[in-house]
Image (tube, coloured by chain):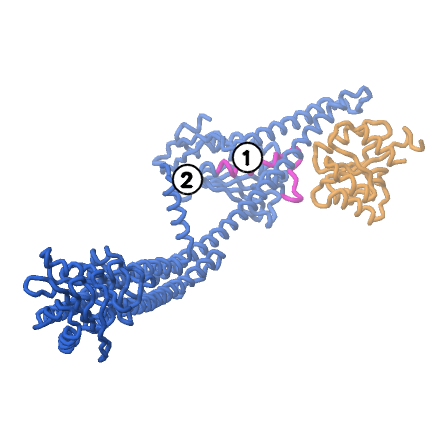
Amino acid sequence: MARTSRQPIRLVVCDDNESVLLTLTRALEYREGLEIAAEAGSVEELLELIDEVGPDVIVLDVNLPGLNGIDGVHELRARDVRVPVILMSADKRNAEPAEAAGARFFYKGTTDLEDLVAEIFAAAE
Amino acid sequence: MRLTQGDGRQLALTRKYHDLPIFWKILLPFTLLMLVLGLAGAFLVVRDLSTNARRSLDRDLFAHTVTARAAVLDAEFSLLEAVRFAANLRGLPESTAQGDRPQTAELLSSVAAVKQRIDLLVVTNEAGEGLVEITRRGEERHVDGGHPWAETPFVASVLDSGTGGLEDKMAGLIDAGGERYVAMATPVRRGEVVVGAVLAGIRTEDLAGEVSGRASTAVALYDGDAQIVAASPDFVNTDHPLPQDAENGRAVSSADGRLSTLHAPLELRGREVGMIGVQLPTDEALGSVRGASIRLALLLSAAMAAVVGVGVFLSRSIVSRLRPLIDTNRALGRGEFSSRVALQGRDELGELAEGFNQMAEQLEASYKELEMRVAERTEETQRLYEELLEATRSRSELLAGITHDFRTPVFAILGHAKMMQDPDFHPDDPSWREAFGETIYESGDYLLQLVNDLLDHAEFELGHAEIEREPMDIGALLSHLEKTIVPLARASDLEAVVDIDDDLPIVKADEARLRQIVLNLVSNAIKYTPSGGRITVTAVPKGRRVQVAVADTGLGVPEDVGERIFEPFYRVEGTQPQKGQASSGLGLALTKRLVEAHSGRIWYERTPDGTTFLFTLPATRRRKSQKRLQTAGAG
């Protein structure tokens, strides 16, 4: 309740696939209470901008070229970035390692993004 | 074919014989044959010998009988002489007629003195009463008289002969004073009148001894009732005296077979008065047969023992040489293929062993070869299995790649569609409709491209890809494609150059496929070349080939990628198609397949600026002039 319409949740969305990234940002952008603070195509890119952007929640794809999403979580924690992370994957087997890394998990095999939105709000709490 | 019971038995016997060990197989017939032949031979020999011995015995008996009868004949003659001498003695008829006993005794004594062989001399009166009777035993003489001799049949006959005119000398066996005699009688005549009779006798006991001595054998004399009257001391009564035996002249044997007796009629003055039996021991004659039989039996036994011994030796020598063959055979059976038989001799067994060894060698060689082949096949199978595993793995990877690549555009299309359906969707930017449309279109387009590539790929995989190769001018095709390539590159802010050698040979190719090859390589170059870069397409003749190169100034390919770049859905780690570009991940794999279907080769070279993909196609013939064929230009 602290951040209602006046203080939207600031997101960084990270996915290597351009059309997926575009679809995600467009779908989250117009939701009330959410704001896309930045986009990234890779973990490396994310790490570069994280300090500057200072988001409330990070939405991160697992399957990325170079460092993958789970590596990314470890990397963020190593840099003492405590921002909640939602790891997305079309492979449900990634749920367990994602949660083990201290992140939430979203199954990307659906286009119903209500669950993702719910996860974002829950993470921001 | 039906077997009779006899056949069955024969079969069973044959089988039993087959089951016998070789040792017995050889020995048994040898022994049986030897036994049968030996026994048959011995039987024949012994039978011949005993027949001969029996015949010789019969001959001997016959000869002795002849001698014995001659001796009896001698005695008869002595009796005849004695009675004739006495009857004709001067004064005797008178003294007899007068019954002058002293005178008659004197006269008769003179006769007895002359006829030493005669044991009994009698003179009777005409009534048959004994007038004088002189009995001699050794040197002693006993004179007697008064016996009623007329009771003696042949004496009575002699006394009657004067009236009847019957034979005047008659003989027979008589009893007198407890003794038995062979006696002869004749009438005493005075003138024509019979006044008495003279009787002379030889003691049968003495006669038997004499005959026995003459015939050198045991002799017995029988009376008319077949009772022994006298016998030599060595004669054994065998209780066989039957008149018919004397008739048929056949020898009879004693119950124990040790004596043989031949009986013959005892005749005196042509009258049969009894029998004479001549006896010989059979031992002498048959003893030799027995000895011969024993010798024969010994010889036969020795021969059999020798034959059996030889048989045993032969069987052993064969069996002992078969043993290594059997042992080696078993060893081979156990899989000891290096086993061999030690060769002995050059006979059939030696040949067998040699043949066996050759067979074993062949077997060993075959087995080794088989093992080698099995090893080879196993290796081959292992290799195929690994290839299969690899194929399965790459198929799974392909499937994973397809799934991943399909999901992305679908995600974008469905995601946008969902947003548009949301009644709360009020984007600030009024141009959202155009932007959404573009994204959906691009995603759909990409999906289509993906489906097309996948179908092409599947066609190759299934071997259904149709490549219709015809002679064509590749230069013409490339210069035609320049019109497509240049704007395509320009859309991505790239410069494109197409440089075609004027002297390209004709190639045999499927025009649509060749166009696909070139455009795939060009679009691949465009996707991975940043803005401001350059794409260069060149075509030059290379010997009997045409070489086409598509060079870019792009991101380049890491050194360790190698041929994997041509695998379906392979993506170089860390590289991304440039913004607005999507790759199906099948383009290069499909391109390689297409080139190879044209008997060409495709590869890439890393250049300082980026990457160059090259492919060659075999030429059919050199073009003779600069004049371009119109086949390609039309497409």
Viewer-side residue, B1 vs B98: B98
Quick one: which residue is furthest to the bottom in this view?
Answer: B139
Helix, strand or loop at mark 2: strand
Q: What secondary structure do most residues of the magenta stretch adopt? A: loop
Tag of residue B71: none
Viewer-side residue, B305 vs B363: B305
The residue identified by callout 1 is B520
Viewer-side residue, B157 vs B371: B157
Tell me if I can see residue B310 in this picture: no
Q: Are marks 1 and 2 in contact (CB under 8 Å)?
A: no
* Residues packed near mark 2 inside 10 Å, few (<14), some (14 to 19) or many (20 plus): many
Name which quarter of the figure residue A54 lies in: top right
Indicate the position of residue B188 as horizontal and vertical percent values: 11, 66
Tell me if I can see residue B221 in this picture: yes
The residue identified by callout 2 is B618
Indicate the position of residue A111 as horizontal and vertical percent values: 75, 28
In the visual, does B475 lie left or right of B276?
Answer: right
Mark 1 or mark 2: which comes first in sequence?
1
Chain A, hue in figure: orange
Viewer-side residue, B589 vs B125: B125
Chain B, hue in figure: blue
In the visual, does B208 lie left or right of B621?
Answer: left
**Chain ID at mark 2:** B
Kind of residue at disc 1:
Asn
* Residues packed near mark 1 inside 10 Å, few (<14), some (14 to 19) or many (20 plus): some
Indicate the position of residue A119 as horizontal and vertical percent values: 84, 33
Q: Over which residues does the magenta segment extend?
A: B572-595
- Whether discs 1 and 2 lie on one chain: the answer is yes
Kind of residue at disc 2:
Pro
Indicate the position of residue B43 as horizontal and vertical percent values: 29, 60
